[in-house]
Amino acid sequence: GLYVAIQEYHYQLMPLKFLISLLNSVSGIPFTPPMEMLFVLALFEVLNQASIRMPRYVGTALSIVGAIVLGETAVNAGLLSSPTVLVIAISAIGINCVPDLVDAFSILRLAVLITGSILGLFGIVVFSMGLIAYLCGLDSFGSPYLAPFAPMMEMISPGLISTLMSYRAWIWP
């Protein structure tokens, strides 16, 4: 979502040499950046679901080879740009770092992409604030979900002080 928002609305934030390189790689692509990202997200999601339903080693090989072959073929055919495939690949690696939350992060990634493609960086900031406000209101087994940071009324709690002190001791030994 951040890549699409910057590419669509806030391209002046990019360094000039990077912008020229990006424009050269995107010049012959028939899709708009949001449509291109949705296409690549759908492609990677199909590969991910196929690898989940296959046996362990076959699924891993299928996802790696499929991503390389399909990504390279789409870039060579002129359907996708290389930066888009790179951004989605980095996103997929980051999402798979927390295996239990892959489904939730996939939905959040899609929501951020749609928000960023419609409203730009402003939309991403508003979406992030809404997500943090939602997480602050959640309780998990009777304790706040973002404890010790979440409930602002208990800001001077022993948990927050011990967390900050251990962080401070880690920085300044």
Image (cartoon, rainbow, N blue to C red):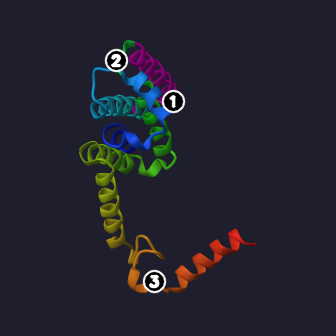
Local crowd size for mark 2, using a 10 Å CA cut-off: few (<14), some (14–19), many (≥20): few
- Label ID, residue 155: 3
What residue appears at the point 28 percent right and 42 percent down from the top-left corner?
117
Camera-side mark, 2 or 1: 2
Q: Are marks 2 and 1 in contact (CB under 8 Å)?
A: no
> CA–CA distance between discs 3 and 2?
53 Å
Q: Earlier in the sequence, mark 3 or mark 1?
A: 1
Q: Earlier in the sequence, mark 2 or mark 1?
A: 2
Horizontal and vertical percent position of residue 122: 30, 54
Question: Mark 1 falls on what kind of element?
Answer: helix
Local crowd size for mark 3, using a 10 Å CA cut-off: few (<14), some (14–19), many (≥20): few
Horizontal and vertical percent position of residue 11: 38, 39
User: Was residue 117 drawn as part of the magenta stretch in this picture?
Assistant: no
Camera-side mark, 3 or 2: 2
61 shown above or below 116: above
Q: Nearer the viewer, residue 7 or 40?
A: 7
Give the magenta part as a residue range. 53-76
Question: Mark 3 falls on what kind of element?
Answer: loop
Which residue is identified by label 2?
28
What residue appears at the point 30 percent right and 59 percent down from the top-left corner?
126
> CA–CA distance between discs 2 and 1?
32 Å
Which residue is identified by label 1?
60
Question: Mark 2 falls on what kind of element?
Answer: loop
